[in-house]
């Protein structure tokens, strides 16, 4: 094991993956990152209809922090900055994530190392930003000193009777069928044909560390093709992944995930969405990497969003786990992944995906014939 993993312990077998790294494989962290971000702050989108976007957002469990004719800020109940920023635009578009710097001085260090500048954010957000572009071409902001919103009332997790342990007596359990109050933004998942290059960029520039690697079945020697990446907060546990990244034929937003109180909030909130005609993409189930209880929905603009509860939390001592990527390996229990979740919900989507794969093979990137074979192996799994 390289010196990049000094201090890490070998707990993957029992915690989060079937096996650990082999000698010489990617260490999952940088020995000397420029800075270490502490969390994801928000995601930015363009959408043509802010009224429609806000209606879904409130049914999904967001609160509105700011609403103008051209801008919509959505927030969770935690005391923090807004977690979704939507600007009016002619078409639906994901604009990129913003991450939180540990110290304002980190912005100066990051700007100096990347040849950029520290700039003020709009007055509605406050604070400062360094605006970067990752190797995939995705705009990435690193921010500090933003306005902190006061906490809002949140749903209280239920008290459960487990086995013979009675914690609830003479009291009923009647979770109301209401929107599942979003507490905070948990993670963002993206796809890129420059996976390794982009992965190393986040580890070296932002100090993030890998919780789990996935590889194509039978192709471990080519290296990882997906990673679940967390923030390095030292001994303070962080979400199993704040960013997940996968090799694919095009740059693509895959989904974003928002924490709710517990399974009851997630399930009752899902019924609320279903009754209002919104489309469930996949769920309810429990993931393997990250262990989250999940429920995926499509918003009216086609973006995939997830309610989650009970996710893994790791400090910086855990080494990355390694596991083959398979559709059947995405969940411990629940229904199998839907065609919509896998991006082939219709004949048109399937044809579009195949065309993207063929086009990617014509360009100089990491999506090659072995990657194409690997994807088909995953689909057939």
Image (cartoon, grey):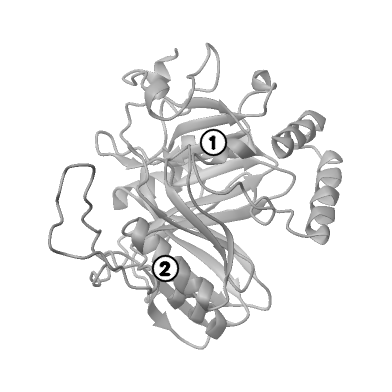
Residue highlighted by disc 1 = 227
Looking at this view, is 235 or 146 the one in front?
A: 235
Give the quarter of the image for residue 199.
top right
Above or below residue 328? Residue 77 is below
Q: Residue at x 25, y 39 (%)?
A: 236
- Give the position of the C terminus as an image quadrant: top right
Q: Position of residue 100 (x, y in %)?
A: 37, 53
Residue highlighted by disc 2 = 269
Give the quarter of the image for residue 66.
bottom left
Q: Position of residue 20 (x, y in %)?
A: 47, 19
Q: Residue at x 87, y 41 (%)?
A: 362
In the displayed structure image, the side of residue 64 where residue 370 appears, left or right:
right
User: Mark 1, mark 2: which one is toward the viewer?
Assistant: 2
- Give the position of the N terminus as an image quadrant: top left
Q: Residue at x 31, y 20 (%)?
A: 7
Q: Considering the numbered disc 1 on the image, is that residue within a helix, a strand or a loop?
A: strand
């Amino acid at each position: 094991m390289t010196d990049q993993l000094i201090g890490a312990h070998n707990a993957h077998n029992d915690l989060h993956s079937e096996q650990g790294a082999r000698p010489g494989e990617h260490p999952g962290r940088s020995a000397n990152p420029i800075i270490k971000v502490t969390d994801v702050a928000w995601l930015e989108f363009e959408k043509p209809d802010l009224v429609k976007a806000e209606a879904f957002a409130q049914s999904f469990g967001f609160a509105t922090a700011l609403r103008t004719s051209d801008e919509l800020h959505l927030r969770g109940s935690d005391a923090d900055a807004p977690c979704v920023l939507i600007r009016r635009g002619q078409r639906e578009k994901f604009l990129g994530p913003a991450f939180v710097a540990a110290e304002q001085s980190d912005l100066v260090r990051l700007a100096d190392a990347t040849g950029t500048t520290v700039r003020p954010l709009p007055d509605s957000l406050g604070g400062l930003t360094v605006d970067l572009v990752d190797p995939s071409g995705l705009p990435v902001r690193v921010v500090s000193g933003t306005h902190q919103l006061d906490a809002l009332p949140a749903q209280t997790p239920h008290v459960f009777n487990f086995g013979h342990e009675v914690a609830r007596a003479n009291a009923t359990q009647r979770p109301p069928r209401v929107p599942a109050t979003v507490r905070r933004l948990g993670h963002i998942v993206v796809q890129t044909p420059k996976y390794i290059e982009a992965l190393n960029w986040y580890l070296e520039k932002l100090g993030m560390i890998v919780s789990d690697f996935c590889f194509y079945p039978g192709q471990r020697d080519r290296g990882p093709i997906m990673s679940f990446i967390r923030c390095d907060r030292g001994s303070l546990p962080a979400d199993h992944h704040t960013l997940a990244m996968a090799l694919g034929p095009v740059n693509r937003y895959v989904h974003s995930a928002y924490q709710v109180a517990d399974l009851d909030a997630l399930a009752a909130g899902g019924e609320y969405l279903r009754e209002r005609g919104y489309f469930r993409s996949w769920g309810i189930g429990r993931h393997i990497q990250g262990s989250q209880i999940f429920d995926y929905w499509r918003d009216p603009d086609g973006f995939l969003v997830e309610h989650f509860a009970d996710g893994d939390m790791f400090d910086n001592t855990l080494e990355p786990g390694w596991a083959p990527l398979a559709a059947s390996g995405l969940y411990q229990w629940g229904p199998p992944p839907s065609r919509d979740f896998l991006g082939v919900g219709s004949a048109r989507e399937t044809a579009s995906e195949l065309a993207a794969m063929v086009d990617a093979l014509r360009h100089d990137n990491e999506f090659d014939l072995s990657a194409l074979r690997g994807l088909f192996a995953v689909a057939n799994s």
